[in-house]
Amino acid sequence: MKLGIVGLPNVGKSTLFNAITNAGAQSANFPFCTIEPNVGVVAVPDERLDKLAEIHQPDKITPATVEFVDIAGLVKGASKGEGLGNKFLSHIREVDAIVHVVRCFVNDDIIHVDGNINPARDIETINFELIFSDMEMLERRIDRTTKAMKGDKSLAAQVELLKSLYAHLESGKSARSFERSEDDAAIISEIGLLSDKPVLYACNVGEDDLTDGIDNNEGYQIVQKIAAEEGSGVLPICAEIEAEIAQMDKEEQAMFLEELGLPCSGLDRLIQACYSLLGLISYLTAGKPEVRAWTIVKGTKAPQAAGKIHSDFEKGFIRAEVIGYDEFMELGSMVAAKEKGLVRSEGKEYVMKDGDIVLFRFNV
């Protein structure tokens, strides 16, 4: 999973990126501090791996990972090249989902590129730049498809679809809110529109907002409403707190979060929210050589899940021996689980579930 962190300059993007990745990206109080994207790979927090490791004592523990890309601050006119905008937009094209950091905290010492705090305006500025870029791309696609239609009348329906999508964008709406059939979705996904990517709005709030009640933060309420209207995710997070947590060891982090009354770190909540946004789950493999988490899309069948490990596993798939994590932990070993008849033999049509512990049988 590759997540692009975007937002206007000085909203806390790089501070948040540094905190969650410990990558040491440059962070400063002036626009375009980040020009080339910083990249950090983060292990997906999963306590199930630690529990399984206690039982199997493996040589290696391998969590699933998320790649965060800190993309430079966008400004009005980015789609026309303002603020090196075209370069920044190309970086967004490469990610699976967008984490849009929106400033919802007040601090007179940190300048805002537009002079004052206005989450709705900030979101609109970024969204419009993505939409404008998409409109240019669609114009070229419509032109090419229309010319090709002269020799292939079956493309007429595609041209109409593209024109409808263009009108939708022209009205100021993101491509992700455009209703489409399965066939239409396949055509649209080929184009790679920026405003079609799933978005999680990360509301950068003050420490007091998280500890005293986020519902009192007016900016967060505004972003929640916008996210609901367009089917996006929203998450309150405090970059300042995350920066403090990043400097602590695990024991100190736990004590600090407990003092603040927070169940887990912002990183944990951010990854959970992005998994949900993208419809991702994890299945597990466990044994003496390795305990590992594998990320798949919800609804993936067993052979395709096996293919995540190696293509030969999918080609020669015979069956999957499966037990749910909770069932396994109640018994404490695969031997005990088999004696109880809880290890199921599943075939090619089995749909994987989050937390499945699996042994794939295959023959190539």
Image: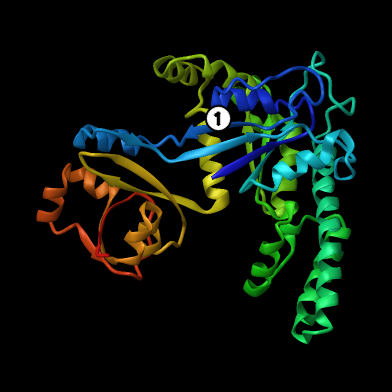
Query: Which of 190/280 is in front?
Result: 190
Residue in view at x 71 percent, y 55 percent: 196
Say how the picture is coloured: rainbow
Residue 315 in the image, given as x and y percentages of width and height? 35, 66
- 267 displayed left or right of 226: left
Residue in view at x 72 percent, y 67 percent: 179
Residue 348 in the image, given as x and y percentages of width and height? 33, 70
- 28 displayed left or right of 293: right
Q: Quadrant location of the C terminus? A: bottom left
Kindly state the secondary structure of the residue where label 1 is placed.
Answer: helix
Tally of numbered tags: 1
- 258 displayed left or right of 166: left
Residue in view at x 84 percent, y 83 percent: 150
Residue under pointer 1 = 266
State which quadrant residue 86 falls in: top right
Residue 184 can be seen in this image? yes
Name the residue type under label 1: Gly
Q: Is residue 40 above or below residue 294?
A: above
Residue lying farthest to the left in this orientation:
339
